[in-house]
Image (spheres, helix red, strand yellow):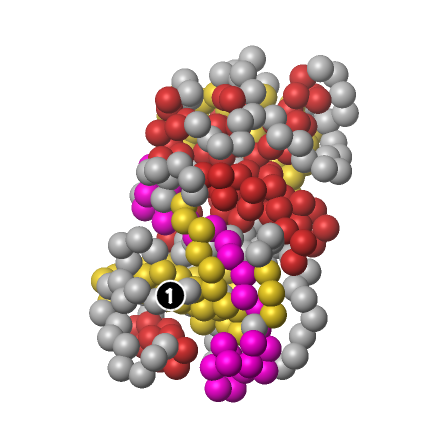
């Protein structure tokens, strides 16, 4: 029973790996392969950003948190466990994703920069996408998966090869399916020379100045960012780049030198809700897994495991449509 997975970003690769681990032969079809996917531009840090509905997102994010923490123990994956600080300017309640994180506390007054009234200190996985995606692709091939580089213009092309199709095309589903609820959320990031910050820093609630994040990685540091709904331009904006540098500098010790390596743009697949469900089209079925907003990496393993559960249920004659209440592990959790 061959399964065709459409898309070679983090969602498609994670689904491919879990399906192979569950015993399914898998072909992955994609127009672009790493390092030329949207996932390659991701910062990336575990954080459920711009993804809904919260109840399902929390389950997927919690499961992915577990898997990524296990992968952080495996050399070569590009996953690191890093502690950091989210800053807010007014006192707030604990975030809705609090239950997914194991190490979490309120920031003390001494830890807060001037102008901030509250904050959270927590430890989460940081994922170096230039290392993680090649590792993930290598794992897929090692398990026996096949990669076919091709542009798919219709689901009929995939159904001609197999009745079992998993759609992980992200923003591409707008054209492939005619899903007009999808929209680009343009994000710009700067990659700078490492300067060894002791922690990551996040401030995505400052509407006046814009979102700010500083994410240290093994060989560089990512500064961000932007979230422009409806803007599909992939051309870096020098004005935005300077604004990102200025916002980051305000959160760093005075005199910190920020040397830019490159300025990149990615398009997040915005949608009112993540779409993870079966759909019937012309007598055929397709299992969708897209619309993860700014949380593609954060939801990747939880969604992939639900894909395996739904496909297995369909294979043995169960219902095609409907979410899984609590996605169960269907493969090895350490990815090895």
Q: Residue furthest bottom?
A: 115
Residue 80 percent location from the top left of the image: 41, 49
| Residue at (44% x, 27% y) in the render | 336
Q: Residues within 10 Å of mark 1 (few under 14, many from 20)?
A: few
Question: On the rendered structure, is 85 left or right of 94?
Answer: left
Q: Using the rendered image of the protein, determine whether residue 298 is visible from the camera's viewpoint.
A: yes
**What range of the chain is rendered magenta?**
108-134
Percent from the top left, x then y, of residue 166?
56, 30
Where residue 115 appears, as percent x and y from the top left, is 52, 86
| Residue 165 visible in the snapshot | no
Secondary structure category for the residue under label 1: loop
For residue 198, above or below residue 304: below
Q: Residue at x 67, y 28 (%)?
A: 310
Q: Nearer the viewer, residue 20 or 78?
A: 78
> Residue 141: which quarter of the image?
top left
For the point 45% across and 51% down, the residue is 81
Residue position for label 1: 198
Q: Nearer the viewer, residue 110 or 74?
A: 110
Q: Is residue 89 above or below residue 149?
A: below
In the image, 235 versus 292, the foreground residue is: 292
Query: Does the stretch in magenta take in 132?
Result: yes
């Amino acid at each position: 029973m061959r399964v065709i997975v459409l898309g070679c970003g983090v969602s498609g690769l994670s689904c491919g790996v879990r399906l192979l681990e569950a015993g399914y032969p898998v072909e992955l079809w994609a127009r672009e392969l790493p390092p030329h996917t949207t996932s390659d531009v991701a910062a990336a840090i575990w954080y459920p950003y711009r993804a809904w509905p919260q109840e399902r997102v929390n389950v997927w994010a919690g499961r992915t948190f577990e898997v990524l923490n296990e992968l952080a123990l495996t050399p070569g994956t590009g996953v690191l466990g890093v502690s950091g600080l989210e800053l807010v300017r007014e006192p707030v309640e604990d975030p809705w994703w609090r239950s997914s994180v194991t190490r979490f506390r309120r920031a003390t007054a001494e830890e807060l920069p001037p102008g901030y009234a509250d904050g959270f200190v927590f430890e989460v996985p940081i994922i170096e996408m230039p290392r993680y995606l090649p590792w993930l692709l290598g794992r897929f091939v090692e398990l026996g998966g096949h990669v076919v580089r091709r542009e798919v213009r219709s689901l009929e092309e995939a159904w001609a090869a197999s009745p079992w199709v998993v759609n992980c095309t992200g923003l591409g589903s707008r054209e492939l399916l005619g899903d007009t609820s999808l929209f680009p959320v343009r994000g710009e990031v700067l990659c700078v020379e490492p300067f060894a910050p002791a922690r990551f820093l996040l401030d995505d609630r400052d509407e006046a100045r814009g979102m700010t994040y500083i994410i240290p990685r093994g060989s560089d540091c990512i500064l961000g960012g932007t979230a422009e709904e409806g803007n599909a331009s992939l051309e870096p904006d020098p004005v935005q780049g300077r604004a990102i540098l200025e916002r980051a500098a305000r959160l760093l010790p005075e005199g910190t030198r920020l040397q830019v390596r490159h300025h990149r743009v990615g398009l997040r697949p915005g949608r009112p809700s993540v779409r993870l469900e079966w759909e019937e089209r012309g007598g055929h079925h397709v299992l969708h897994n897209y619309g993860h907003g700014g949380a593609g990496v954060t939801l990747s393993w939880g969604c992939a495991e639900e894909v395996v559960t739904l496909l297995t249920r369909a294979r043995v004659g169960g219902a095609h449509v409907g979410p899984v209440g609590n996605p169960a592990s269907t493969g090895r959790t350490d990815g090895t």
